[in-house]
Each structure stands twice: as C-alpha cells, then as structure tokens.
Amino acid sequence: METKKYELPLLPYAYNALEPFIDQETMHIHHDKHHAAYVNNLNAAIEKYPDLFAKSAQELIMDLSQVPEEIKTAVKNNAGGHVNHSMFWEIMGPGAGGKPSGKLAEQIKKEFGGFEEFQTKFNDAGTKRFGSGWVWLVQTKDGKLEIMSTSNQDNPMSEGYIAIMGNDVWEHTYYLKYKNMRADYLKAWWNVVNWQEVEKRFSN
Ligand SMILES: [Fe+2]
C-alpha cells in the first residue's frame, strides 16, 4: 500500500506579511519549527500503523476511536496541531481585518448582539484559557454559533463541532512581540483575520 506522509503546507504569504501585528521572526519559528514538529511527530506516530496514512489529519481527529491506543495521544496532539495550524495560516492574511459580511455577519449579530460584542467575548475566552490552547468560533450541529476554548491542540471537531475560526493562544504565537500580554495579542489579531476565508468555513 502506498503511504503518503503528512506534509507541512507552505505559508500562503510572506513571513513578514502580517507585520506589524505578527512579526516575521515569530512566523518563522511558528510555521517552520512548531508546525513542522507537529507534522514530523504525526508521521513518526503513524509509521507504526501505516494504513492510517490513508486518512487525512482531519479525519483522524474527527474520530480518534479508530486510532490504536498506543499512538492515540500522539495523534490527538500532533494531528490536532497540524490541522489547527493549517487553518490558522489560511484564515489570516496581509491587508486583512475589518468585519465579516453576508450570512456570517448576520448570524454573529443575531447571536452575540453585534460584531464588537462577539470580539469581546472571543478575546475574553482566549484570555481565560489557562496555559496553552486555542479559542474558537464554532458551529453546532443545529447551526448555532458558539465561542469556546480548548486546551493544548484539541480541536472542536473531535467533539462534533464545525471549527469556523480559531486563534492560537500558545505563548509561541505571541511571546516574542507581546511577551506575557496575551490580551494585547488577542486584540491586535483582528487586524490580520481574513474574513473571506473564514466565511468559506461557515455553512448556512
Ligand atoms: Fe501554534
């Protein structure tokens, strides 16, 4: 059987493209070292059960019951890290920011009261996530929007949600520029959100 290893995607823009909000050095370390490590560690874990290479990283985390116990934790962390970061690069971009439009904007207004209220709630959830993790906008099975946070590289998809957007609140995301000020990073991050890409992930 042919085994196709998981691969680190290229960053869809230059390393300095998100300046001044996310600095070039952070992007290099984050993509070239951290994300690469998740991919390498995922490949190393799956080597023991190569039939699983037929599944995408997303399929692995959507149903961890299919993963042997011996490698389950490694797959959860590293397939999660791979999926989460692959999304993260895509939902950011240069010259981005602003507000969502269309159906997503309407539903955010309906469920959170407005875009600013949504941002405040998202930032708050990201600030309060203790230790390392992610803050998310998710869609429930019945189509409702919710803000949630997860620890480590856990992805809401493992719990049956659709992850529409997520922000990485691991210190490796912001520490060089923002030091311990996670709340400042969370506020600045809105300037690089690529809403067109986020809207593609929202089904209505
Ligand atoms: Fe990260």
Image: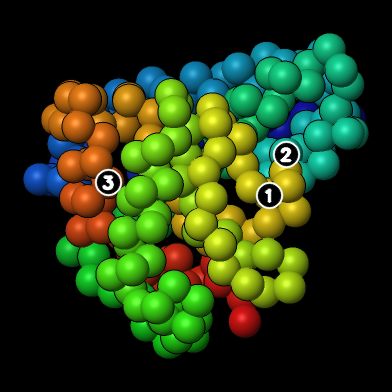
Q: Which residue is mark 1?
A: 157
> Which residue corresponds to the image point at 75% horizontal and 53% vertical from the top-left?
160
- Earlier in the chain: of badge 2 and badge 3, it is 2
- Kindly tell me whether residue 56 is visible in this rendering: no
Secondary structure of the residue carrying numbered label 3: helix
Find residue 58 and name its label.
Answer: none
Left or right: 75 in relation to 90: right
Q: Are marks 2 and 3 in contact (CB under 8 Å)?
A: no
**Quadrant of the rendered structure where residue 24 is?**
top left
Q: Quadrant of the C terminus?
A: bottom right
> Which residue corresponds to the image point at 72% horizontal and 39% vertical from the top-left?
61
**Above/below status of 50 relative to 103:** above
Left or right: 83 in relation to 54: left
Alpha carbon distance from label 3 to label 1 = 22 Å
Q: Which residue is mark 3?
A: 186
**Above/below status of 26 relative to 83:** above
**Above/below status of 170 relative to 18:** above
Give the residue type that dot 2 points to: Ile
- How far across and down, in percent of the image, does residue 116 sit? 28, 70
Find residue 61 and name its label.
Answer: 2
Q: Does any atom of ligand 1 lie closer than 8 Å to the CB of label 1?
A: no
Residue situated furthest left in the rendering: 20
> Which residue corresponds to the image point at 56% horizontal and 62% vertical from the top-left?
146
Left or right: 165 in relation to 140: left
